[in-house]
Amino acid sequence: MIISIGTIGLDTTRTPFKTVERVLGGAAVYSGLSASFFSKTGLVGVIGKDFPEKYYKTLKEKLDLSGVKVDKQGKTFFYDSTFDYGFTKRQANKTELNVIENFRPKLPETYRKADYVYLANNDPDQNLEALSQVIKPKLTVCDTIEYWILNKKKQVEKMMSCVDVVVLNDDEIRLLTKEPNLIKAAKKVLSLGTDYVVVKKGEHGSLLIFDDVVFPAPGYPMEDVVDPTGAGDSFAGGFLGHISRIGKLNEQTLKEAVIYGNVMGSFAVEDFSVNRFLRLKAEDIEERYQTYRNIVKF
């Protein structure tokens, strides 16, 4: 079983072409839905009294929600952002922590035995508290965003030292390490104590770095990008999902997992919110994976 720990939220996303308001979002949501195509997945997080019932039903159809707490006194995490014309940069307009600010995660008994854990964008102290409740997971992965790097950098670094894989985008890893070169930046993150680092580079793909291995994986070529929100967490869901279904960790599986991560991220950007995942089928994923392999083969 995979558990995805992090924000479950409402997003207002502004692009040069369209704006959507208070749609289903959150790092745990994107990663959880992405992972659910590969293995049984549960969410750990908190929602408020304003979380729409239709969104809860949508999640319940795909995921185990026994780790989701409903705070009837507070409001759901909210994130408002704007993308530039090329979808390469995002500006955070407003971040309202709301119910997650004082959330204390308590894992259900079944979640404590989870083999695979993803600590998505969330307060690093809360992520570590949740991780401490899991008994001997096979693989742990974490991510973070600019907000936590700026406000809780030491706790972010502690979280990274406690997991097997750190996944960051190029802006975040440069901000964290103060190192412009991505390979050098990844090695600084490895020095914190993690075993593997994945650097997400948006439309340009990703880098897997560990030991003496540097594996660059180009992004899947996309003609129609609608909303890049959640692409990174969707990557993580596909990455961890593939590893969980294979059940073993070696260089080949890791490289395949990076490709599946890129593939899941490519689906996420094709529509606003998580809408593309609600229409997605397992055969669509495998077809795109094979197409990807054919594109990079020479």
Image (cartoon, helix red, strand yellow):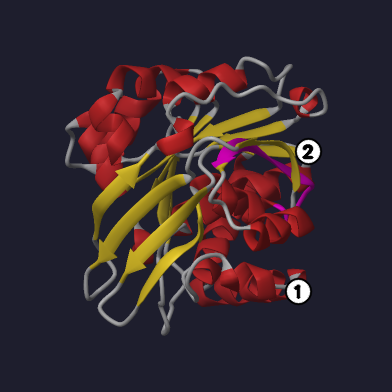
Residue type, mark 2 in image = Met
| Residue 140 location (% of width, % of height) | 60, 30
Task: Name the element at disc 1.
Answer: helix
Q: What segment carries the magenta color?
A: 36-47
Find out whether the residues at labels 2 and 1 contact each other: C-beta distance under 8 Å.
no
Q: Is residue 143 visible?
A: no
Farthest residue toward the front? 73
Mark 2 is surrounded, within 10 Å at the Cα level, by few (under 14), some (14 to 19) or many (20 or more) other residues, namely many
| Residue 77 location (% of width, % of height) | 45, 44
Q: Is residue 240 left or right of residue 152?
A: right
Provide the residue designation for mark 1.
283
The image quarter in which residue 228 lies: bottom left
Is residue 279 positioned above or below 8 on the image? below
The circle drawn on residue 1 is 2
Is residue 144 positioned above or below 245 on the image? above
| Residue 132 location (% of width, % of height) | 62, 15
Of circles 2 and 1, the one toward us is 2
Earlier in the chain: of badge 2 and badge 1, it is 2
Residue 151 belongs to the span the image colors magenta: no
